[in-house]
Image (cartoon, rainbow, N blue to C red):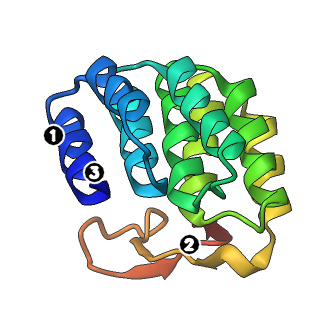
């Protein structure tokens, strides 16, 4: 039964039929995977509020939200320029056991949409060095020989 429900919800995700995905959740006994897929359908259809409702339902059903569930909800908020909610969800993901770089990137994108650069920088700083790596080599813009092929390593780090 659960596999069939997941398949039906997955079809709704592909077709961006968020309302049908939510109806299916109400008609059956969904598992974490089906709920996450319904959240994704909402996110892809710019229904951030409904995505958050599914996350709340997940928690109310004592189904621990997965990292991908948080990412889906944060992405839904980002796509609708709801940066405050995206940051709240990132905090909840941290409290639930940490967050992945995907959750952080989605929250950063929400800040970027709102031109909240200081907030984005604070998120990057808070993420710390455990999520950073050296940037790739870039063409040396300081070189007087354009196109010489010289490369320099960009200064600083990029957060993943």
Image coordinates for residue 141, horizontal then vertical, percent: 44, 62
Label annotation for residue 154: 2
- Cβ atoms at labels 3 and 2 below 8 Å apart: no
Image coordinates for residue 47, horizontal then vertical, percent: 44, 18
Secondary element under disc 2, as helix, strand or loop, is loop
Crowding at mark 2 (Cα within 10 Å: few <14, some 14-19, many 20+): some
Tag in front: 2 or 1: 1
Question: Is residue 44 at all visible to an observer of this figure?
Answer: no
Position of residue 43 relative to residue 150, above or below, is above
Q: Residue at x 42, y 28 (%)?
A: 26
Question: Is residue 86 at all visible to an observer of this figure?
Answer: yes
Q: Earlier in the sequence, mark 1 or mark 3?
A: 3
Q: Earlier in the sequence, mark 2 or mark 1?
A: 1
From the viewer's perspective, tell me whether residue 22 is left or right of residue 108: left
Q: Residue 154 or 157: which is nearer the viewer? A: 157
C-alpha separation, residue under disc 2 versus residue under disc 1: 44 Å
Label annotation for residue 115: none
Among the 4 quarters of the image, the one containing residue 3: bottom left
Q: Which residue corresponds to mark 1?
A: 11
Q: Residue 73 or 61: which is nearer the viewer? A: 61
Q: Which residue corresponds to mark 3?
A: 6
Q: Residue at x 77, y 68 (%)?
A: 97
Q: Residue at x 63, y 42 (%)?
A: 107
Q: Residue 36 or 156: which is nearer the viewer? A: 36
Q: Residue 18 or 145: which is nearer the viewer? A: 18
Secondary element under disc 3, as helix, strand or loop, is helix
C-alpha separation, residue under disc 3 versus residue under disc 2: 45 Å
């Amino acid at each position: 039964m659960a596999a069939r429900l997941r398949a039906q919800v997955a079809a709704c995700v592909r077709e961006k039929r968020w309302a049908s995905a939510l109806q299916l959740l109400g008609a059956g006994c969904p598992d974490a995977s089906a709920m996450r897929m319904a959240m994704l359908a909402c996110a892809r259809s710019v229904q951030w509020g409904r995505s958050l409702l599914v996350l709340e339902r997940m928690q109310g059903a004592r189904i621990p939200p997965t990292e991908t569930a948080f990412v889906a909800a944060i992405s839904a908020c980002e796509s609708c320029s709801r940066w405050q909610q995206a940051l709240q969800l990132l905090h909840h993901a941290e409290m639930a056991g940490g967050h992945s770089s995907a959750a952080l990137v989605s929250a950063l994108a929400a800040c970027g949409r709102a031109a909240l650069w200081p907030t984005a920088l604070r998120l990057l700083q808070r993420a710390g060095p455990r999520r950073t790596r050296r940037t790739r080599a870039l063409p040396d813009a300081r070189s007087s020989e354009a196109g010489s092929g010289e490369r320099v390593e960009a200064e600083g780090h990029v957060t993943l």
